Image (spheres, rainbow, N blue to C red):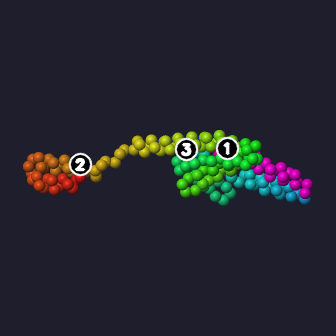
């Protein structure tokens, strides 16, 4: 039995810094008939909504309803998006583009550092896949058993058991 290598897994979630304005606003509204408490609860739920899991081969995004996966080898472009508050707080959104769709990882801390790490992981995974393809055994240029049958026919021709015309006619079937 061959042991499969264990994948490294990193889990991240949206940073509280991404929702700082919502937290501040809801705390300020607490004296107004408890509206701030309801708003604080809503912001906390929104903050906990997204979770991301990174492995050596793919990225998984989960929210309360859906789960989406992207294989690293399919990612064509990685971009960081920040508004001015996110920039000041050191958080941002990372958007991953494939040929079919895009996935946005929201409110992650140190987005540019994460982008660099992701791009390196994508490059490494593509190189591993390329090496795996290069190490695969090559398919023969001929059908299985064809070379043996051609050798047999050549032997019969050399022994004089097959005429030159028949040999040439049959040899064309093996090309």
- Residue 143 numbered mark, or none: none
Instruction: Let me know if residue 16 is in the magenta part.
Output: yes
- Residue 122 numbered mark, or none: 3
Q: Write down the residue under mark 2.
A: 147
3D distance between C-alphas at marks 3 and 2: 42 Å
Using residue 85 as the reference point, say whether residue 10 is left or right of it. left
3D distance between C-alphas at marks 3 and 1: 16 Å
Q: In which quarter of the image is the N terminus?
A: top left
Which-is-in-front pick, marks 1 and 2?
1
User: What stretch of residues is rendered in magenta?
Assistant: 9-32
Q: Camera-side residue: 44 or 98?
A: 98
Q: Specify whether residue 3 is in view.
A: no
Contact check, label 3 and label 2, Cβ < 8 Å = no
Q: Where is residue 28 in the image (x, y as percent from the top left)?
A: 87, 52
**3 or 1: tag closer to the N-terminus:** 1
Q: Where is residue 152 in the image (x, y as percent from the top left)?
A: 17, 49
Question: In the image, what residue occupies the spot 22% across and 53% down?
Answer: 174
Dot 1: element: helix
Q: What is the number of callouts on the image?
A: 3
Which-is-in-front pick, marks 3 and 2?
3
Using residue 138 as the reference point, say whether residue 18 is left or right of it. right
Q: Write down the residue under mark 1.
A: 111
Contact check, label 1 and label 2, Cβ < 8 Å = no
Dot 2: element: helix
Tag 3: Cα neighbours inside 10 Å, few (<14), some, or many (≥20)? Answer: many
Q: Where is residue 84 in the image (x, y as percent from the top left)?
A: 75, 47
**1 or 2: tag closer to the N-terminus:** 1
Instruction: Let me know if residue 47 is in the magenta part.
Output: no
Using residue 119 as the reference point, say whether residue 154 is left or right of it. left
């Amino acid at each position: 039995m061959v042991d499969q290598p264990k994948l490294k897994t990193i889990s991240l979630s949206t940073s509280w810094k991404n929702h700082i304005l919502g937290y501040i606003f809801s705390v300020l509204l607490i004296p107004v008939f408890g509206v701030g408490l309801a708003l604080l609860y809503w912001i906390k739920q929104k903050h906990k909504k997204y979770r991301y899991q990174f492995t050596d081969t793919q990225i998984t995004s989960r929210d309360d309803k859906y789960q989406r996966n992207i294989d690293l080898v399919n990612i064509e472009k990685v971009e960081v998006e920040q508004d001015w508050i996110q920039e000041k707080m050191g958080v941002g959104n990372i958007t991953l583009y494939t040929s079919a769709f895009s996935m946005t990882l929201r409110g992650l801390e140190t987005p540019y550092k994460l982008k660099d790490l992701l791009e390196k992981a994508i490059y490494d995974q593509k190189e591993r896949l390329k090496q795996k393809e290069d190490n695969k055994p090559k398919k023969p240029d001929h059908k299985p058993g064809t070379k043996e049958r051609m050798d047999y026919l050549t032997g019969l021709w050399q022994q004089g058991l097959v005429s030159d015309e028949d040999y040439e006619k049959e040899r064309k079937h093996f090309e």
